[in-house]
Image (tube, helix red, strand yellow):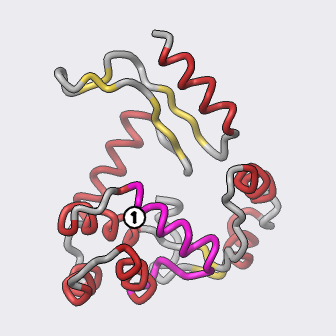
Amino acid sequence: MIDPNTNVNGEEFEAYNIRRWGSSGWTRHLKQEGRKSGANFANWKSWPNTLKAHRFVKYCQEKCNIDTNRSNEALFEALYEKGENISLVPALLSVGETLGVEDVEDLRSYLESNDGEDDVKAEIEKGRRQYRISGVPFFVIGIEDESSDGWNQAPYGLSGAQSKSTFVGIFDELSNE
């Protein structure tokens, strides 16, 4: 989660940053790096509480067989490019419709309940312990050994905005091993 202490309905972007860090100046580097990769952050208006968004991804994967990469990309687009507050059920329903979720009313019922909340929180806590995740974005890169339920080497953990060259360097190193 971005910040579990964020108001459950999200907060206005600038007000949140002023309250939390004194300004939103720290986002300049994130936005610069993002623009190099096509993430323009053109309409970032809110700071979300992402618990419902995590549950949305879980629902889309488990009930609709929608790949988590697709649902996360759609959430990114909604939040950072379209200016939607993904803390709120109506915004998540809109994203679900763009992804082709057929039973929007079932999705609404799920998001308005607490279903899946404990599972999502447990998964987040596991990531914090296993990979020492303390911020987002956080990337875990490695080669998973499917036969042994784990990594056949220690995975790389990257926190924060990263350049393409950082990822390419890690992929090159992994492909040589």
**Residue 134 position within the rendered picture, expressed as x and y whole percent measured from the top left:** 52, 45
- Residue 40: which quarter of the image? bottom right
Total label count? 1
**Residue 32 position within the rendered picture, expressed as x and y whole percent measured from the top left:** 79, 53
Q: Is residue 123 left or right of residue 76?
A: left
**Does the magenta segment cover residue 131?**
no
Q: Three-letter amino acid code at disc 1?
A: Ser
Against 169, residue 128 (above or below) is below
Against 37, residue 21 (above or below) is below
**Does the magenta segment cover residue 87?**
yes
Task: Give the residue at x 57% y 24%.
Answer: 170
Q: Nearer the viewer, residue 130 or 103?
A: 103
Q: Is residue 87 left or right of residue 55?
A: right
* Residue under pointer 1: 71
Task: Give the residue at x 25% y 68%.
Answer: 59
**Residue 98 position within the rendered picture, expressed as x and y whole percent measured from the top left:** 41, 78
Against 167, residue 44 (above or below) is below
**Residue 2 position within the rendered picture, expressed as x and y whole percent measured from the top left:** 52, 60
Q: Nearer the viewer, residue 157 or 11?
A: 157
Q: Main secondary structure of the magenta part?
A: helix
Q: Is residue 39 left or right of residue 84?
A: right
Label 1 SS:
helix
Mark 1 neighbour class, 10 Å CA radius: few under 14, some 14 to 19, many 20 or more: many
The magenta region covers: 69-89
Task: Give the residue at x 20% y 27%.
Answer: 149
Q: Quadrant of the C terminus?
A: top left
Task: Give the residue at x 63% y 45%.
Answer: 160
